Image (cartoon, rainbow, N blue to C red):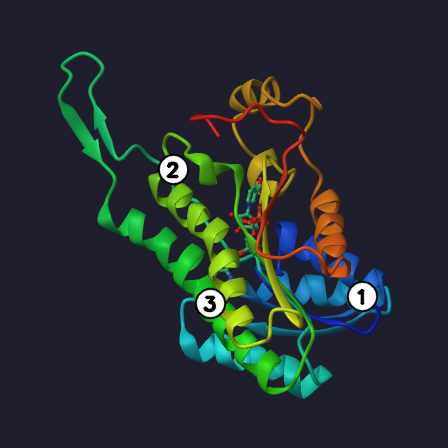
Amino acid sequence: MLEIKDAVAVITGGAGGIGEELAKYWVRQGGKVVLGDISAEGLSRVEGEIKAIGGAVATMVCDTTTEEDCGRLADLAMEKFGGINLVAPAAGIIRDGLMVAPDRETGKVIKKMALQQFQDVIHINLTGVFLTVRECAERMINHGCRGLICLFSSTGSLGTAGQINYSSTKAAMSVMPKVITAEFFRRGLADKIRCVAIAPGYVATPMVKGMDQKALGKILGEVPIGRLVEPSEVASLIGELYRNEALAGETFFIHGGLRLGSRG
Ligand SMILES: NC(=O)c1ccc[n+]([C@@H]2O[C@H](COP(=O)([O-])OP(=O)(O)OC[C@H]3O[C@@H](n4cnc5c(N)ncnc54)[C@H](O)[C@@H]3O)[C@@H](O)[C@H]2O)c1
C-alpha cells in the first residue's frame, strides 16, 4: 500500500472541477500538489484556498497542448518537491455536436461538425494528456519515483451521440493504461509506476450543474443512485487507486449505476 502523506501529485485542470477537488483531497491527506491550468484566475483562487488549509502547493499557468509547458510543469514538481508520485491529467473540454445533422423535414444534411470542433477536443483531451504523462513519466523514471498515472476516461468512452470528438478521446484514455502498463512491464518498471483510468458518469462540476435543467433531469432518470456523482467521491476513488498497488492497467467506472449503452 502507498501512503498519500508527502506524496507529490501533478494535476492538470487543477483550477476547477474534478482537478480542484482532487488537489484539495490530496493535501488533506498530507500530500503536496503541483497544479497546471490555462486559467490563471482559477489557479490563484485554488492556490489561496489550499494554502489557507495549510497545504503545500505550487501552480503554473500552462497549456497542456504544448510540449514546453508540460515539461515545465513536470520540472516545477521536481524542483519544488523533489519528485512526482501521482500524475492526474484532468484538463479536458467538451465541444458537442452531431457529426452530420440532417434536417428533420428534408432529410438533407444542414450542418456538420467543423474540423476545428473535432481537433480542439483531440488536442486537449488526447495530445495534452499524452504530453503531460510523457513528461512526468520521464522524470519519475529518471528519479526512481514510485506512484500512479491516473487518466480521465468517461462513460462517454462507450459511445455517446453528439460526442464523436469527446467519446473518441475518452475511449483512448481507456486503452492507454494497458499500453503504458505493458511498456513499463517490458522495462521492469510496472511494479513502481502503475497506470489506470477512471471513467466517471455525470459528476456535479459547474459544467454539468450548469446544464439545461430539463436535460439534467432526464439524465438523472437514468442514474440508479438518483443524483450526480460528487467530485469528492471521484477524488476519493483516485486516492484508493493510488494506495492499492494491485490496481494497474484497468479502467474503473464511477457512475452511480448509470444505465450504459449508446447513450453513455
Ligand atoms: N464532469 C463530469 O461529469 C465528467 C465526467 C466524465 C469525465 N470527466 C473528465 O474529467 C476531467 C475533468 O473534468 P471536469 O468536469 O473537472 O472539467 P472542468 O471543465 O470543470 O475543468 C477542466 C479544467 O481544465 C482546464 N483546461 C482546459 N483546457 C486546458 C489546457 N489546454 N491546458 C490546461 N488546462 C486546461 C480548464 O481551465 C478547467 O479548469 C476531464 O478530462 C473530463 O473529460 C468529467
For numbered disc 2, what is the local secondary structure?
loop
- In percent of width and height, residue 211 lies at 53, 31
Disc number for residue 70: none
Q: Position of residue 262 (x, y in %)?
A: 42, 26
Instruction: Read off the residue under disc 2.
Output: 163
> What's the residue type where badge 1 is placed?
Ile
Q: Which residue is mark 1?
A: 4
Which residue is painted at 53% across and 80% down in the image? 138
Q: Residue at the location (66% across, 76% down)?
A: 84
Residue type highlighted by circle 3:
Thr
Q: In the picture, which quadrant includes the N terminus?
A: bottom right
Mark 1 vs 3, N-terminal side: 1
Q: Kindly identify which residue carries mark 3.
A: 64
Distance from Cα at disc 1 to Cα at disc 3: 25 Å
Residue 62 visible in the shown view: no
Asked if residue 123 can be seen in this view, the reply is yes
Q: Which numbered disc, 1 or 3, marks the residue closer to the eye?
A: 1
